[in-house]
Image (cartoon, rainbow, N blue to C red):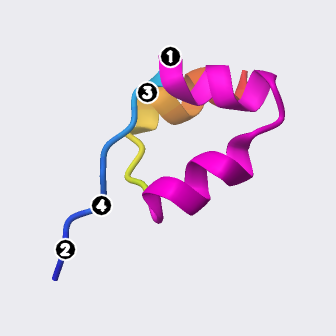
Amino acid sequence: MTQRPIIDAGPSLNFFSINKERLLMSVLGPLSVPETVRGEVLR
């Protein structure tokens, strides 16, 4: 069993702002996102 990478808000927002979130997911696979980061990205 492999652990999922944990991503911070900064890199998440960078990929989402240029509409490349699919690239991020295809390279890293499933991610773990802390609740605080999830809230920042969704705002």
Tag 1, which secondary structure?
helix
Circles 1 and 3 in contact, beta carbons < 8 Å: no
Circles 1 and 4 in contact, beta carbons < 8 Å: no
Q: What residue is rendered at 43% in x and 27% in y?
A: 36
Whether residue 28 appears in magenta in the rendering, the answer is yes
List the residue tagged with mark 1: 10
Judged by its main secondary structure, the magenta piece is helix
Could you tell me residue 22's position as x and y percent? 72, 53
Bin the neighbour count of mark 2 within 10 Å (Cα to Cα): few under 14, some 14-19, many 20 and up: few
Instruction: Report the mark closest to the observer, 4 or 3.
Output: 4
**What is the number of the mark on residue 36?**
3
List the residue tagged with mark 4: 4
Could you tell me residue 24's position as x and y percent? 59, 46
User: What separation in Å lies between label 1 and label 4 (alpha carbons)?
Assistant: 18 Å
Left or right: where 3 falls relative to 5: left
Q: What residue is rendered at 58% in x and 21% in y?
A: 40
Label whose residue precedes the other's in the sequence (2 or 1)? 2
**What is the number of the mark on residue 2?**
2
> In the rendered structure, which amino acid carries the disc numbered 3?
Thr
